[in-house]
Amino acid sequence: MTLYVLRRLGAGLVLALLVTLITFLLLSPSFESVVRERLGPTATPETIAGMMTELGFDRPILVQYFDWLGGVFTGDFGRSLFTSQPVAPAVAARLGVTLSLVVTALLITVVISVALGVWAASRGGVADKISQILSLVGYIVPGLLLAIVLVVVLAVNLKLLPAGGFTPFSEDPARWAASIAMPVIVLVIGGVANMAAQVRGTMIDELRKDYVRTLRTRGVSTTSIVIRHALRNAAGPALTVLSLEFIQMLGGALIIENVFALPGYGQYAFNAALQGDIPIILGITAFGVILVVVVNLVTDVVNGWLNPKARIY
Amino acid sequence: MSIEELSIDPGLAAPPRRSPFRKLLRDPQAVITASLLLVIVLLGLLTPFIAPHDPNEAQLSAINADPGTPGYPLGADQNGRDIMSRLLHSINTSMISGLIGASVALAIGITFGLIGGYFGSRLRSVTEWVFSLVMTFPGILLLIVLMPVTKGDYRFTMLIFGVLLSPGIYRIVRNLVVGVKNELYVDAARVAGLSNLRILARHVLFVIRGPIIIAAAFLFGGAISVQAGLAFLGVGSTLVPSFGAMISEGFLNLYIDPMQFLWPSVLLGVITASLVLLGNSLRDAFEGVKLKPAKIAAPKVEQVAGRAESRPSDALLEVDDLVIAYPTPSGKLNEVVKGVTLRVNAGETVGLVGESGSGKTQTAFAILGVLPAEAVIVRGSIRLEGRNLIGLSERELRQLRGRSIAYIPQEPMSNLDPSYTVGAQLVEGIRATTGLSKREARERVLALLKRVGIQDPKRTFDSYPHQISGGMAQRVLIAGAVASRPKLLIADEPTTALDVTVQAEILDLLRDLQAELDMAVVLVTHNFGVVADICDRIAVMQNGQVVESGTALEVFREPKHPYTQKLLGAILDEATVRTDPPVSAGALAGGTTR
């Protein structure tokens, strides 16, 4: 088991290194223009060259990358080119906002999707119709439009929820919930449309398997067959979908949080990219990759544990 | 016709059926969404001719002009730009986004899917790794982060987005190709000397055509949404009119003029919704029947009014005029069991014999009440000790299952839940029917496992199904079936999936258990040898009907129905070929039927 986790962790590390290296290489041609931008219109070739040297941009690219990497391993992600703030705490704070959104949405999505998917697969008829229509509606309505409609209706017209801003959970849980309610609704609707259909599909596959019939002939109750057996076997494939859903929601959240003026990852990344704040861009990429690696690792480990054939003792 | 043409004919690959495109034409959802998209695309193409203004032409006099202002049919935005012109130009922006995103994803995904699926596994593991790497990264974040590289050009951004979408296509194509690669007709083409490239182009592309068209619709829609989202954020040039940018500006201007927000939203909504719905229609047309839910319930019964009453009976099981049907795609019922009548007395063994498709397994499932969800019992009765089982609820049937009727399946491995240990599955069955405590049930299971001939019951108890052999799994299933001492055991081809040596042992075990527990056994089989071994009486089924029944001795000595004679003849033939020495009585017996 330990070996397995270590191997997966190793693969994740390679992924993180590759993605940051590629980002670094892609960004490197724009270093000079970033410096020029920062110095403003009065910059002379000399001052630009001086600044390039000061920031270390004149060294070979790989040397710069490994220098940055060395810092990362000691927890130092560098400082913003424009504000001189250290990158790591700033990125972590933004990530916290986005994650509180995504994780909440993901949990709700799982509960609704499993309930809806299992209900549809094992009952058929009206249950199935309802779940399919819900999925379709979730697919059809673009999240962006839904978000705006929610702001207009719930925040502006009905004044039920704050139109924007974020209150940390530690400060006031009730206001925290209110501040993320609308973005979470948007993410959940998109997520459920996707997940519920997946759960339904894998559940139907399982319920049509031979062992289900055999369990029935032994007098085992329908509830136990659906929940203990079929759902248990469907959990593996569903979990893989869930990890992809997480990544997709993370992407979706970047756009959605802008509608609700949440100080999250997306806005931060956007501003940094607009300015060409290289250290922040790299920090954001690195945190993003680490997050993805961790999620995939957890998925793999849980999947390995769920499937007796893959289980390592 | 040359060999090549013969082996290439796609008709050989798949049975001829109605063209999916013709099906699409009959689907109103497909026709409506496709027409809507066509109109929108046409409007986009005609934009240079029909747009009243340049999309970026700002007129101070027109700021926030109302719809209907001369020259501004839909009004103007807060910069005094014509909304209709901007809408028309935005159509082109989103269509180009969709085109770039989808075609890049398709080109990369298909190319590497074909390579990864068709050629060796070493190459595959490399492509696999690269694509799973791409798949795990949050694409939108990357698109934002790379803004200094793309300079915000939406076409470049969509190109990268296409790369990010390609793993999905890669997986679809790779799976299809791996599946089709080992088909006989591809082997035939290879033997006929066709180059890999031609096989790929003609056979494999034919198979992946449908899924690719479906995926393309969803990719197109996905790319359009993402482009709109990015433009909403502000990624990209302000000079490029797009729905995202218009929605963003309209959003800021919402209180002054909500219509400015509404127009682009509606158009974007219509485009993405049409693409999703069209994608669904395409899926229906190309992939046919949708996945139907698998409701766990007692079989559907068509005729409720005339349900046969229960009545006292001296037989253990009486099946009378049982008709089972399945609905065809056109909605009509297709009968697979056409009036089966069968009688089983307590403690006797009855062989239900017939070729595959004769309806014997359907009959067995009907007796157990575990027919597939689609099946309909059209008429007839199934009486267990006089009580009619047809029309009972799943709950009522559950009371009988395990205790009164039990079942041994054909394929041992697939009939065990892979996620639970053998012991846990058996314990659950026993506890469901007897109400024993966990520990008592465990003792009982261990004893049963020992009884069915498993050497190390404790070890098997704690094993997962994949850790035991097929023969052992079948013994486990037999243990599960007899655990609650049923009166009637239905064994569906219990030895077919097993090795010949194991077959004999399993039959011996069944015979011993039957005598020991005084059960009646219905043995469903296509093998007369098995029947001869252990059956008291025989019912021969053909084409959904019992064509002959009698004691084993009668049927073997004087088969009356021609089908029975043919079956018996075939068995003797088989025996001759398999076991007997070249010159023997067996060869003579075989000779008579030739």
Image (tube, coloured by chain):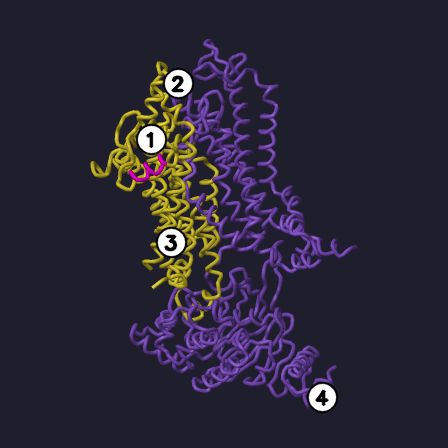
Tell which subunit mark 4 falls on: B
Residue that mark 2 sits on: B256
In percent of the image, x 38 and y 72: which residue is there?
B426
- How far separated are the C-alphas under marks 4 and 2? 101 Å
Label drawn at residue B353 = none
Q: Nearer the viewer, mark 4 or mark 2?
A: 4
Q: Is mark 3 on a helix, strand or loop?
A: helix
Residue B505 point in image, percent of width and height: 49, 83
Residue that mark 3 sits on: A300
- How far separated are the C-alphas under marks 4 and 1? 90 Å
Residue neighbourhood size for the residue with mark 4, other residues' Cα within 10 Å, grouped as few (<14), some (14–19), many (≥20):
few
Task: For the N terminus of chain B, give its image quadrant.
Answer: bottom right
Q: Nearer the viewer, mark 2 or mark 3?
A: 3
In percent of the image, x 45 and y 77: which residue is there?
B475
Q: Which amino acid does label 2 sit on?
A: Ile
Residue that mark 1 sits on: A268
Viewer-closest of A78 and A49: A49
- Note whether B418 is above or below B197 in the view shown: below
Q: Which amino acid does label 4 sit on?
A: Leu
Q: Is mark 1 on a helix, strand or loop?
A: helix
Which chain appears purple? B
Q: Which amino acid does label 1 sit on?
A: Tyr
Q: What element carries label 2?
A: loop
Tell which subunit mark 1 falls on: A
